[in-house]
Amino acid sequence: MQTGSISVQTENIFPIIKKFLYSDQEIFLRELISNAVDATSKLRTLSNRGEVTGELGDTHIEILIDNEAKTLTIRDRGIGMTEEEVMKYLNQVAFSSATEFLEKYKEGSIIGHFGLGFYSAFMVANQVDVITKSYKDAPAVKWTCDGNPAYTLEAADRDFRGTDIVLHVEDESKEYLEEGRIQELLTKYCKFLPVEIKFKDEAINNTSPAWKKQPSELTDEDYIAFYQELYPHSDQPLFWIHLNIDFPFNLTGVLYFPKLTNNLEVSKNNIQLYSNQVYVTDNVKEIVPEFLMLLHGVIDSPDIPLNVSRSYLQSDRNVKKITSYITKKVADKLHDLFKKDREAFEGKWNDIGTFIKYGMITETKFDEKATKYVLLKNLKNEYSTVEEYKEKVKATQTDKNGKIVLLYSNNPIEHHSYIESATNAGYDVLEFDVVLDNHFMQHLETKNSDITFTRVDSNTIDKLVDKDEKRESVLSDDVQDELKVWFTKRAEADKATVEMVALSPDEMPVVITKPEFMRRMQEMSRMQGNNAFGNFPETFNLIVNTNHTLINEKLLNLESEEEKVELVDYLYNLARLNQNMLKGQDLASFVKKSINFLG
Ligand code: ADP
Ligand code: MG
């Protein structure tokens, strides 16, 4: 037997390994299995080159739990190591890279995904045995280390090629002797490793996942089946993009468009990052633009540096290129779908619209491309691109300043009468009802200086698209002022502004409008949830139609003050009712009064 001491440093790294890496403890299994996979892949490469002759035989990797001996074993049938190689790779290479890793870890500059390698075994074991036999004609050896820098190396009796890593699991880590826990870790980290992994005599991985294949080899059913493998029990994806690039960096993957729920948060953390089929993380924030995190699927790239700090990762040129490549691919795929089958694209709009709008608002690169196919939907369920829509309404909806006014409603039921007026005037009304739409409209206004969005209830029909055409009032200014006083008295309590306006006699006698600008300010202050915009009061305008006979005949000719107050109050409430603002006691007395009128 041979003994020696691994460490040339003064500091003993084992206690540090145990203490510092507590939160990432479970990655030891991935590290050791990755080494087993590497050893097997190397053997296959040598065999392909003819440097290993004869049958390779079985090359699967096994995970074994021995509850009596309290050991967890990772067994491979890879290249194995000779005695010299054990000395070199475990005592020098692995040890010094572990030391280096720990130095960086202490500085806090490690992302924590990869690096510790073989020595991560000491996070959970108080003794590690390596029993190995090289593919070369050399005797098997056993290396043992019990967590202090001293190790022993002795001859072992093993008659088959490959390596056993035997972990003597310490008490605090005894969860790693539980089948359930190991199963969980294998599912998380090893599901798509390229060498077959067996646990309890069952293969746990798919060695050639869809993303590693050529798109031409795969049918739609294959993609859908792979999606189910990644996300069991979920809805079918809408469509997918196969990423496949080897220059200037290496990246493969399949990204799926899921059926989106309106709650954007729910679907984050769904893209999995792999490095050569080894699972790394589902936190891809630094690598994928935010809006793309709504997608599902897999990205696999050995070129994404994993051993560096997050801030470095964000500024890394490779990562930047990867990000913009993925963005471009997604944008182009959507454009393809739009061009090839517009009807199908429109059919998917409910599911992909939010995603596209979000992308346009947050990613300039994506915005540039998506402008061509982002769709606006009107209340007749017709879809148009922004350019198409401008053409469509230009003739009727251009205002005195030359801006095209795009009318919309976020609640067609509440806005029914306003929509009816707009439609009668020959206008088109868009439907916008997603939370995101407020931002999206502003975004489009910024990008298109010739358009402006106005909610359908924000002004009287004559002013909605302000063409500076003035209708004559049948009442003189003096009489208008006289009548205005009655309305002002009633509206004062609600801080509403009264305006006497000459509308068509067919329009309502009294209308409540909520000016677009005021409403946006209110919404903004509500969304910020603070006083950044002041506490914007819920204000509105009360528009009195001086051309309506209820105003210019009935009200004007009433004798008593009492009767005037009563009619004004009734008309005022009618306008509130029309805006869904009449509630509770006010609504009840309004209904009672109406019944009295009829009776
Ligand atoms: P890395 O995998 O990054 O090289 P590790 O610390 O994980 O670093 O492993 C150090 C070295 O030990 C490997 O490069 C390899 O040469 C050797 N090694 C570890 N595990 C095995 C194994 N199961 N079979 C053969 N060689 C191994
Ligand atoms: Mg390794």
Image: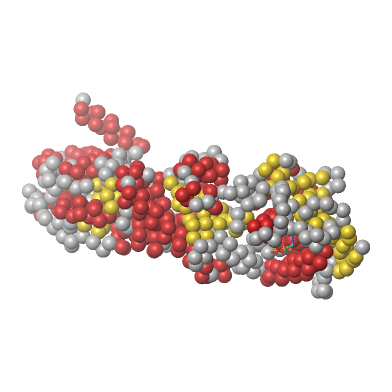
Which of 558/399 is in front? 399
Which of 599/457 is in front? 457
Q: What residue is drawn where x is 28% and y is 42%?
A: 381
Figure quadrant of residue 529: bottom left
Q: What residue is drawn where x is 23% and y is 43%?
A: 419
Residue 404 shown left or right of residue 164 in the figure: left
Figure quadrant of residue 151: bottom right
Look at the picture and state if 382 lies above or below 135: above
Q: What residue is drawn where x is 87% and y is 66%?
A: 150
Residue 312 shown left or right of residue 331 in the figure: right
Look at the picture and state if 4 lies above or below 576: below
Q: Position of residue 104 (x, y in %)?
A: 68, 70
Quadrant of image for the C terminus: top left
- The colour mode here is secondary structure
Q: In the orientation shown, which residue stands out farthest toward the right? A: 1
* Number of numbered discs: 0
Q: Position of residue 290 (x, y in %)?
A: 48, 58
Which of 188/18 is in front? 188
Res. 322 visible in picture: yes
Res. 565 visible in picture: no
Q: What residue is drawn where x is 28% and y is 47%?
A: 383
Q: Position of residue 291 (x, y in %)?
A: 45, 56
Q: Position of residue 54 (x, y in %)?
A: 72, 53
Residue 380 shown left or right of residue 171 in the figure: left
Quadrant of image for the N terminus: bottom right
Q: In the orientation shown, which residue stands out farthest toward the top? A: 599
Which of 117/56 is in front? 56
Figure quadrant of residue 329: bottom left
